């Protein structure tokens, strides 16, 4: 069976619902995971997704901040959330797919950005980010999250490899690419262990970005991107990954998110 899963930090699902439905119409992933929905559950635009053919919806939102959602053409057998760091933030959601794909878990994560100062002693936002990634590693090991057929996606807010950023030299002391963050994310990945699905198709020595700052007046020409969005799969699904697409064009749409959607195809 063939199916696909996409992930996108949309930076307000209500503000950009037209962009989301446009993407769904053009690329038609079977499952779409959204981060930074910035929407309380009661105000989530269920109707727009159902009209687009995505009748199965799981959400964990909060007003003005954070928020994750999963919309799908495939039914869910169950869904749940975990409160990482016990802060009450809507940063994780998992669904178990039903039907022919019964038993496939899809985890949707939104890791804290971490603020501007890469020092946990003086920046509580950065300390929170590091603690969150540490807990991801502990959770993966304790819960054996990658023991079966599992997919982990989301805005992990860390660009781990040298060519996941436009300049390793310029950004090695900038939040999202510091050695401390990279080391902790590697530990979280190894704790699964999880397979980096995107880098199965793009060698480590080639540039790969999913985010371009709003601060750049000409993002496409400058191309100062980072790979902050990731798709990891459990070893049981490693050989099932059949293709991937980073939909860079979405960054050029009117009033875009600073992230672009990623889609990974599977063949079981």
Image: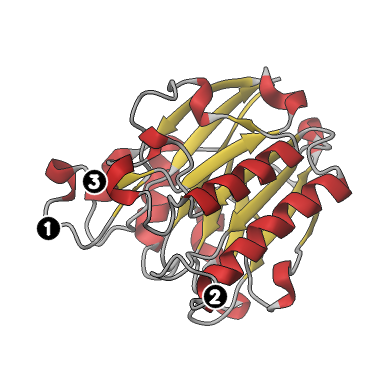
**In front here: 55 or 222?**
222
The percent coordinates of residue 15 (x first, y second) are 37, 70
Name which residue lies at 43% across and 50% down: 177
Query: Above or below — where is 12 with respect to 54?
Result: below
The percent coordinates of residue 164 (x first, y second) are 39, 38
Please identify, in this view, whether the residue under mark 3 or under mark 2 is nearer the observer.
Answer: 2
Please name the residue that numbered disc 1 is placed on.
217
Query: Above or below — where is 213 with respect to 25?
Result: below
Please name the residue that numbered disc 3 is placed on.
224
**In front here: 124 or 43?**
124
**Mark before the other along the chain sequence, 1 or 2:** 2
Q: What element carries label 3?
A: loop
Quarter of the N terminus within the rendering: top right
**Mark before the other along the chain sequence, 1 or 3:** 1
The percent coordinates of residue 35 (x first, y second) are 52, 60
- CA separation, marks 3 and 2? 29 Å
Q: Which mark is residue 266?
A: none
Q: Is mark 1 on a helix, strand or loop?
A: loop
Please identify, in this view, whether the residue under mark 1 or under mark 3 is nearer the observer.
Answer: 3
């Amino acid at each position: 069976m063939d199916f696909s899963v996409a992930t996108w930090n949309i930076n307000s699902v209500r503000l950009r619902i037209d962009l989301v439905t446009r993407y769904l119409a053009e690329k038609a992933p079977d499952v779409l995971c959204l981060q930074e929905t910035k929407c309380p559950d009661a105000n989530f635009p269920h109707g727009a997704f159902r009209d687009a053919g995505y009748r199965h919806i799981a959400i964990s939102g909060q007003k003005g901040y954070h928020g994750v959602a999963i919309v799908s053409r495939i039914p869910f057998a169950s869904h749940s959330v975990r409160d990482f760091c016990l802060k009450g933030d809507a940063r994780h959601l998992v669904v178990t797919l039903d039907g022919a794909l019964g038993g496939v878990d899809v985890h949707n994560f939104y890791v804290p950005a971490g603020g501007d100062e890469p020092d946990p002693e003086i920046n509580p936002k950065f300390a929170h980010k590091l603690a969150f990634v540490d807990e991801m590693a502990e959770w993966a090991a304790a819960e054996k999250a990658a023991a079966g057929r599992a997919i982990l996606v989301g805005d992990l807010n860390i660009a781990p490899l040298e060519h996941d950023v436009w300049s390793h030299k310029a950004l090695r002391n900038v939040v999202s690419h510091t050695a401390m963050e990279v080391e902790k994310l590697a530990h979280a990945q190894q704790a699964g262990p999880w397979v980096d699905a995107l880098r199965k198709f793009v060698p480590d020595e080639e540039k790969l970005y999913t985010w371009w700052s709003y601060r750049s007046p000409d993002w496409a020409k400058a191309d100062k991107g980072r790979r902050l969005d990731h798709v990891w799969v459990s070893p049981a699904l490693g050989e099932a990954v059949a293709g991937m697409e980073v939909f860079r064009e979405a960054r050029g749409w009117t009033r875009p998110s600073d992230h672009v959607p990623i889609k990974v195809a599977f063949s079981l």
